[in-house]
Image (cartoon, coloured by chain):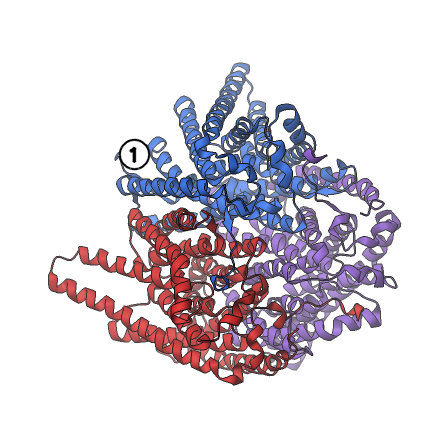
Chain colours: A blue, B purple, C red
Amino acid sequence: MAPRYAPSLRSRLPPLAIVLQVAFIVLFAFFVETEDFKEENEKEFINSYANFQDVHVMVFLGFGFMATFLVRYGFSSVGFSMLVAAMAVQWATLLNGFLLISSSSWKIRMKIQSLVDAELCASSALVAMGAVHGKTNPVQLLLMSLMAVTGFVVNQWLIHTLFKTLASFMSLHVFGALFGVMTSWVLYRRENTPKHQKEKFNSKSGLFAMFGTLFLWMFWPSFNSALVKYKIIAYGTYLALAVSTVTAMAVSALSSPKGKINMVHVQGSILAAGVATGAAVTTVPWMDMTIGFCAALLSTLGFRYLKDHMLHAFECHDTCGVLNVHAIPGMLGYFAYLLIRLVRVDDGTVAIRLAMHHISILLITVSMSLVSGIITGLLLKWSFWRPQQDRKCFDDQAFWEFPHLSVHK
Amino acid sequence: MAPRYAPSLRSRLPPLAIVLQVAFIVLFAFFVETEDFKEENEKEFINSYANFQDVHVMVFLGFGFMATFLVRYGFSSVGFSMLVAAMAVQWATLLNGFLLISSSSWKIRMKIQSLVDAELCASSALVAMGAVHGKTNPVQLLLMSLMAVTGFVVNQWLIHTLFKTLASFMSLHVFGALFGVMTSWVLYRRENTPKHQKEKFNSKSGLFAMFGTLFLWMFWPSFNSALVKYKIIAYGTYLALAVSTVTAMAVSALSSPKGKINMVHVQGSILAAGVATGAAVTTVPWMDMTIGFCAALLSTLGFRYLKDHMLHAFECHDTCGVLNVHAIPGMLGYFAYLLIRLVRVDDGTVAIRLAMHHISILLITVSMSLVSGIITGLLLKWSFWRPQQDRKCFDDQAFWEFPHLSVHK
Amino acid sequence: MAPRYAPSLRSRLPPLAIVLQVAFIVLFAFFVETEDFKEENEKEFINSYANFQDVHVMVFLGFGFMATFLVRYGFSSVGFSMLVAAMAVQWATLLNGFLLISSSSWKIRMKIQSLVDAELCASSALVAMGAVHGKTNPVQLLLMSLMAVTGFVVNQWLIHTLFKTLASFMSLHVFGALFGVMTSWVLYRRENTPKHQKEKFNSKSGLFAMFGTLFLWMFWPSFNSALVKYKIIAYGTYLALAVSTVTAMAVSALSSPKGKINMVHVQGSILAAGVATGAAVTTVPWMDMTIGFCAALLSTLGFRYLKDHMLHAFECHDTCGVLNVHAIPGMLGYFAYLLIRLVRVDDGTVAIRLAMHHISILLITVSMSLVSGIITGLLLKWSFWRPQQDRKCFDDQAFWEFPHLSVHK
């Protein structure tokens, strides 16, 4: 099976991964130190550790297993997500430390929040990966994730430098999704047809995907409260997620000719409320619920109608539908955020300035994601990372050994 | 595949779900507000958030996946449990606020405990659902869960009004189980034979069910400590669960003609100790362990002998055996609770009054569950919710699309 | 299937399990009491409960599901791990209380740390079980786990008595792995060939194993911080686990003739960093990362080359490769720990004494594990626990009923 493909993976992935890994260890040796072992640091650590764990589970288990709905690509989804996330968190810890944390010394001091920030960067890269899942080899995924983390952190740094505001969840989701979709578009224009022959899913792989989805769904309130001061904000996310579950199932059944619920659509769309409320940051439950309702509606309809349209009209294939799950609900939530703030402003000039400010941030994020997505796509097209044989990508057998014990030889 | 069934689902589920969902959002807009964003609320929130998360995982992941042992109904178990739970927590938040929380204003103020309470109500509805799993369509499940939550909260309110005592886990388990069994009995008398043809399970679906069961099992100490002041009570539940695991496997092998352990029996019975100790609320480890031993013994024997007897003698089919997992251990635990308190009383009159008090609570709960279960069963029999085609219910294919990508059209 | 086997299981497992279980309950009734229900105990409980939960999930879910990669033995891996762990924690609570906790009264006072300690003992028994998975019946597993816990606690007591030092993770991993390998060696010399016919795995069972592995991997920082005062030590474990993920995948692809990654090797080797850093207890991130790199390298190469060599040269079959995952990385970490301490010492005599001290501890642990492993192997060979029919062990069908509903009879 795929014997001609294998050699190129062997000669590319191990050298690249080992060289990068050793380089990261050296960089950590020079630039990173932990907090002192003191009571007060310990206390802060324990208080934030549960929140960190929830995000940790989402990044490493949730995103990986969510993509297992592809029958022949289940194991690769999980395995490569883990590889990519493990690299991304190391790279994000370094980049965040260099660019975003102002410190008197040139050393990066690791705190529990550094790990949470690094995992959020990694989750942006995993969102991007959702668009190219099953069409790329692990070497490409590794490069892509490092590019995504770099682009995302540079975007955060740019916004912070220009507007003196902190990171928000809008940029995480919108950047990740558009970056991934652009990369997929550049990589696979005019060649996607033969690749999809093996993209099918069944009830068994659906259960694994449901596991991943549920872990994302259950811990999303923790995710959305990872960057804000008041964790009570989780109430709204929790209720919005409940609303979007009901809405996504209802809309999926309504828009199906046979009246059946589409498992894959629902698994994506029940998360849309989490994305939208993370960007909206309201403090009123019913507003979050309304935003969740709209997000699930848009997302489910996007899966039904937009995903195919994107493929046929723009030759852009988005495996996990990240455009519907992350980009559109992220923007929806951001506009809701802006609207809520505009309503409270009496003065017209102030309102216009406020709107300009937020729309500029959105435009910068969108531009950055498009540009870095296109660059990454072009880079990954380079045949060095992409031998002819990688047409068989939708298949675990191309990358993984499932051997019998050697006694049978 | 069930083409004649589908139209009725499409014309029933989406309108009902969307109307209910919009109504809930409107009710939340008028009646629910969150806590103020203050340091002290924040502190309480963080302290209780981990406990809430454990219950959250049990309700949304545990109960859903526990029922995946049915080979052809795995995906529906998880999907519909999620739909039902998402509705039930919203409805329970509102009902609890209206009936049980006395407040000076007419607004319901959402706290972290409100969410825990709502999830406990939802778990009672999910217990009830266990009895009809695989024999009902999602429209019926939705209605049934709202009825179960209503009945349960009214029961809590009745007990609170009459006896000035707070809710206990006995009522959660006994109400849920008897409600479900009665609904199943009313719905399926004289027609259950053809439905069971597809109720089979194998080792693969058993692993998914084991996942759900394990999450319930691991977090049950958190569940039982959700309503008590001293969380240290979790020690007893923890030990009792360990005892019941050993006991359930031993008794299952002993009562099998072939000496094999029945996977489904064990998955139910290892949880019986959690139910019983939750109702017993002892503070002494060996008592909890003894109660756990008895609960697992009764539950496993119930699965072996009672479940079939119920089916043949009373034409009552209980898919997940909730009678053995929840009702019987719940009552066992409650009698242990009463016994422990009676032993400490010297005065005969006081003892009789105490016994009367607790037995009244049990009788009210049993009556309420029977009455509301019968009403719900009759309601669900109404053909509007129940087209002729729903005989094929034991099948994921009737409700879910598992499509290939549209490029293949 | 296996009808001649079953009777012996029925006549052995239930009596043994029930007698042991009742004996444990009686011992708990006489010797164990919980903490008083006071505010301060409650506070300590809540602070440590999350840490306990992480270890709890690892022991009951992680170790069990990690071994599900065996296609025909998936359900038994999970089921028997749970049975064994449930017994082991009870026995460990008693033994730890009798041998290790000095108390003024003869009662064992249960604290949250008692449960964590008991779970760590159980995890040592589960590591040992990894070497004999799929080749033993549940009666043997039950006896083996009680022997492993006894041996481990006696070893801890010996080290504590002789050297006045507390338990470390080195002894947990090294003891468990060598104990298991010795038991497997004694039990199966000259008879392993026919047993392996059914030891195969596929992509589907691989996903279940990945679940278990991920839960171990994600919560290993909590595991390693379970015994130390400063939980901040988790930073290093977290980074080391990320490094070992990248390294294990790269080395597995590099050492494969086809350039593919071996799923089972990687699932073991990504955990090697956790074992090694747990034994090394450094406080500097880059040191942990370097140790993680070396541990994953050794572990993956061990899976590729050592495992078969052990089988052919020594007739020793190690199902889950615990030698590569636990024993070798554990020793590596312990030597790193010693080296870091030696570098800081100026005086030659002090250095030699320090080295002698630590090497003695290692030698005692190794000797204890070998001796108790051999004794256990000889005990389990006794035909009373081991009827002729247990050759079919690699099969869930031998132990578990997967019945249809009784209506079909």
Q: Secondary structure at mark 1?
A: loop
On screen, residue B388 versus residue C48, left or right, reads right
Q: Total marks drawn?
A: 1
Image height of A135 relative to B141, above or below: above
Say which residue appears at 41% left-offset and 55% top-offset: C269
Image height of A382 relative to B331, above or below: above
How far across and down, in percent of the image, does residue A158 sit?
Answer: 41, 24
How far across and down, in percent of the image, does residue B25 sit?
Answer: 69, 38
Say which residue appears at 45% left-offset and 44% top-offset: A83
Mark 1, residues whose alpha carbon is within 10 Å: few (<14), some, or many (≥20)?
Answer: few
Specify the amino acid type for callout 1: Ser
Q: Is residue B157 visible?
A: no
Label 1 marks which chain's residue? A
In which quadrant of the rendered view does residue C92 lie? Answer: bottom left
Q: Quadrant of the C terminus of chain B?
A: top right
Q: Is residue C319 visible?
A: yes
On screen, residue C29 versus residue C171, left or right, reads right
Say which residue appears at 36% left-offset and 62% top-offset: C227
**Residue B47 vs residue C245, the one in the foreground:** C245
On screen, residue B381 versus residue A213, left or right, reads right
**Residue B116 vs residue B68, the one in the foreground:** B68
Image height of B223 relative to B408, above or below: below
Image height of C173 relative to A39, above or below: below
In which quadrant of the rendered view does residue A246 lie? Answer: top right
On screen, residue C379 versus residue C396, left or right, reads left
**Residue B350 vs residue A99, the one in the foreground:** A99
How far across and down, in percent of the image, does residue A41 sit?
Answer: 33, 48
Query: Label 1, on which residue?
Result: A103
How far across and down, in percent of the image, does residue C322 sit?
Answer: 42, 64
